[in-house]
Image: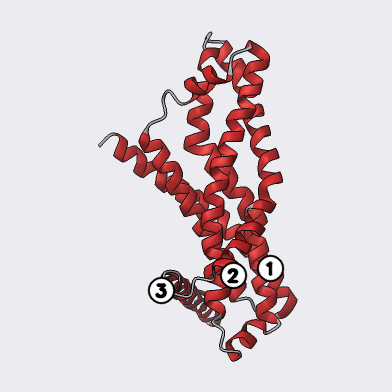
Amino acid sequence: MTLFKKRKYIFTKRLDQLFSDLYSTVRFILLFLKDGFSRPFHFKSILHQCYEIGIKSLPLITLTGFIVGMVFTKQARPSLEDFGATSWLPSLMGIATIKALGPLVTALICAGKIGSGIGAELGSMKVTEQIEAMEVSSTDPFKYLVVTRIWATTVSITILVFYCSFLMLLGSYFNVHTEESSSMLTYFQNAFSTITFLDIFALIFKSVLYGFTIGIVGCYKGYHARQGTVGVGRAANQAVVTSMFLIFIEEVLVVQVAHWIRYF
């Protein structure tokens, strides 16, 4: 009976913690929606964060996007050759990149690089009481630290998705050109021949959604960090894991909704 009560107590405590975290998360998002569209907007801080998030991520995104496009095309070629359908390679890469690879690869890279950075940065400010010091000096830390970073991740990651998608197609083109000596114009015409407006809209929507998710999760974990330096490391780790988990869930949901709209 004592063991049963102990387990019941642990389960109840974890359930209470789950609902408490859920309430805190919803409240955090609602606070962003309230402060994110009201003055002051701190444009200089947003631009600085866009530079830190977007420009400094370009080398990694460039290398990854180009290599993924080239490798994916090289791996897909033997399968299409068995059916004599290598001419479908550009179309295959266009569909794969626009519908899945471009936004997903970019979001996962940014979740690891940007999400952890935001979580660690805000977490260190939280445990060293810099956030409390800003409140004492009549500065709204949420608006200055959180809102600016979420806007920056949403805008920057959306742009990076298009950039990464282009580089994937460019890497694919170089592989196709090496094997078949086809022109770039012909390749891109074939790549976009089966892409519809719904696919482009889904790409934009997923890019904005992934950017917002990475920003909100990184800021939330860092803003609520506890237990000193250990809490900073935990906040950075949880920001990455939670962001990636949510990105995969959102990918499934958006793909399913797009499928319903396409055949409605």
Marking on residue 30: none
* Dot 1 amino acid type: Ala
Residue found at the far front of this picture: 44
Q: Is residue 229 left or right of residue 66?
A: right
Residue in the foreground of this view, choosing between 28 and 38: 38
Q: Position of residue 119 (x, y in %)?
A: 64, 67
The number of numbered badges drawn on the structure is 3
Q: Position of residue 183 (x, y in %)?
A: 58, 16
Give the residue pinned by disc 1: 120
- What is the quadrant of residue 261 in the picture? top left
Up-down: is 15 above or below 166?
Answer: below
Quick check: marks 2 and 3 in contact, CB under 8 Å?
no
Q: Spatial distance from mark 1 to mark 2, Cα to Cα?
A: 9 Å
Give the residue pinned by disc 2: 221
Residue found at the far top of this picture: 84
Give the residue pinned by disc 3: 34
* Dot 2 amino acid type: Lys
Answer whether residue 168 is visible to the viewer in this image: yes
Up-down: is 89 above or below 230?
Answer: above
Mark 2 or mark 3: whose residue is earlier in sequence:
3
Q: Is residue 257 left or right of residue 180?
A: left
Up-down: is 219 above or below 241?
Answer: below
Label 3 packing within 10 angstroms: few (<14), some (14-19), many (20+): few
Question: Which one is closest to the eye, mark 2 or mark 3?
Answer: 3
Answer whether residue 72 is visible to the viewer in this image: no
* Identity of the residue drawn at 50% across and 59% down: 212
